[in-house]
């Protein structure tokens, strides 16, 4: 397994270009299954989760062609199966979108339970509630989810919890239902809007994506040969913004949508980090001491839970005691045990981490416990004194394209060493 070796205390300086959004691409690719035609997707991130999803879709008969490094041509005319049951299904959370896409295309789907980062139980009861409201019968047996519907009928669905995955999955199935579907208490993340825009470009009739009420009027047919460009990754952008601030550097983060970053930008400014916003980029630099803040993660437009681990590292650089409250997942602080090996002064009290700033971090061998915890380990290595060795790098590969190269270009002393196979 590969490892990262970081020699810390280098200020990040220069420019970094953000890749396409992982959590948008994970919904857009399955959405193409509804088409039964050809389409072109631009700005697709080159990350492990997407490579795995493509492999799963190829097992269904989807044909992919790489037009260039980030542009994919997808042909779903020859899709000949509604059974997504390869072992890959369990390797990522985003495989759950095949439920809505296959149900919408074939009125049938058999899928393996999704996988995903291990921070607490990741239920899919809201997804199932949505599919059943649309008229599907859902059975769970032998680790498979079997969905069948003689036809899909539009319905009013109120999500008991604001769920990104359930919002998108219900949208995917509702596009081909008869009549009007309303999703209330819907999630509003930018990637949901991106997926809805792609569906509308192929002829769907979706209104209200990005608000908490989404209306989908079913359509009889969809048209292909469209081109869609994935939005920039809000979480990758936030990770680099935090790394720039934590190393007290000066970085221009390019290919971002500043509006998507507002909850983080506001917090950084509250901490005395300097921010300059342009149309498609944000400059982050630090001149003065950083002040403590309190953060609570919430559904968009609140502070994203996926930036909670990276933000914890930044708060170690602030004067005084800061707190982070995890408002979305019940157990997303496992990475803190690893940081304590570096001298981090953090205690966890239920859903709140209490972070004592000013504690010096020293390099140590640590391991990534999930994707965004891996990003936190990297940032900790960037600010620590001495050398940090990070294992389980495959977690980071799931969601960050060329992270090592991007950091090296910003002046980080970081390299990847190939570990023992297996
Ligand atoms: C998506 O996960 C993202 N993954 C996650 O990003 C992200 O952390 C999360 O949304 C929140 O923004 C993808 O898009 C592939 P949820 P998802 O359904 O859909 C509960 C990353 O690092 N819930 O919005 O699984 C759930 O337990 C990953 O890129 C139910 O109770 O998140 C959680 O407490 C990590 N029942 C809350 O809702 C359900 O049926 C929000 O989960 C579904 C969810």
Image (cartoon, helix red, strand yellow):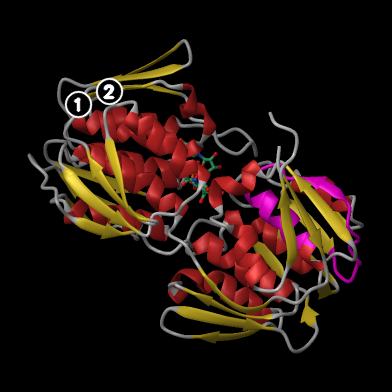
Vertical side of 328 occupied by 319: above or below? below
Q: Position of residue 5 (x, y in %)?
A: 78, 54
Left or right for 77, reference 52: left
SS for callout 1: helix
Vertical side of 137 occupied by 277: above or below? below
Looking at the image, tell me whether mark 1 or mark 2 is earlier in sequence order.
Answer: 2
Residue nearest the observer in this picture, 150 or 394: 394
Tell me the residue at 68%/45% (across/down).
Answer: 393
Tell me the residue at 26%/24% (across/down).
Answer: 136
Membership of 148 in magenta stretch: no
Residue of label 2: 82
Left or right for 147, reference 419: left
Left or right for 150, reference 20: left
Q: Which mark is residue 195?
A: none
Magenta stretch: give its range. Answer: 356-381
Residue of label 1: 106
Residue at mark 1 to residue at mark 2: CA–CA distance: 7 Å
């Amino acid at each position: 397994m590969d490892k990262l070796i970081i020699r810390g205390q280098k200020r990040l300086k220069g420019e970094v270009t953000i890749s396409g959004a992982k959590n948008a691409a994970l919904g857009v690719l399955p959405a193409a299954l509804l088409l039964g035609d050809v389409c072109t997707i631009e700005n697709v991130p080159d990350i492990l989760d997407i490579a795995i999803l493509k492999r799963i879709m190829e097992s269904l008969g989807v044909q992919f062609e790489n037009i260039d490094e980030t542009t994919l041509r997808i042909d779903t005319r020859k899709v000949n199966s509604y059974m997504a049951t390869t072992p890959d299904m369990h390797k990522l959370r985003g495989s759950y979108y095949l439920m809505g896409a296959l149900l919408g295309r074939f009125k049938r789907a058999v899928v393996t339970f999704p996988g995903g980062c291990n921070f607490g139980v990741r239920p899919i009861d809201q997804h199932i509630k949505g599919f059943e409201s649309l008229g599907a019968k859902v059975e769970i047996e032998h680790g498979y989810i079997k969905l069948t519907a003689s036809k899909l009928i539009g319905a009013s669905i109120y999500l008991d919890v604001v769920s990104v995955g359930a919002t998108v999955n219900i949208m995917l199935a509702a596009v081909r239902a008869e009549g009007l579907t309303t999703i209330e208490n819907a999630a509003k993340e930018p990637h949901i809007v991106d997926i809805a825009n792609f569906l509308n470009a192929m002829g769907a009739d979706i209104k209200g994506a990005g608000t908490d009420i989404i209306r989908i009027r079913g359509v009889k047919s969809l048209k292909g040969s469209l081109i869609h460009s994935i939005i920039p990754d809000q979480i990758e952008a936030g990770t680099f913004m935090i790394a720039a601030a934590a190393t007290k550097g000066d970085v221009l983060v390019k290919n971002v949508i500043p509006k998507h970053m507002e909850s983080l930008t506001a917090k950084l400014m509250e901490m005395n980090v300097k921010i300059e916003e342009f149309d498609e980029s944000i400059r982050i630099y630090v001149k003065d001491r950083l002040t403590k803040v309190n953060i609570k993660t919430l559904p968009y437009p609140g502070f994203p839970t996926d930036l909670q681990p990276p933000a914890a590292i930044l708060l170690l650089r602030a004067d005084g005691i800061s707190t982070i409250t995890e408002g979305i997942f019940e157990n997303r602080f496992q990475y803190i045990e690893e940081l304590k090996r570096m001298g981090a002064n953090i205690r966890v009290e239920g859903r709140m981490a209490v972070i004592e700033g000013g504690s010096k971090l020293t390099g140590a061998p640590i391991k990534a416990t999930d994707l965004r915890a891996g990003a936190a380990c990297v940032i900790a290595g960037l600010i620590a004194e001495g050398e940090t060795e990070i294992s389980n790098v495959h977690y980071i590969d799931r969601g960050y394209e060329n992270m090592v190269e991007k950091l090296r270009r910003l002046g980080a002393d970081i390299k990847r060493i190939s570990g023992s196979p297996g």
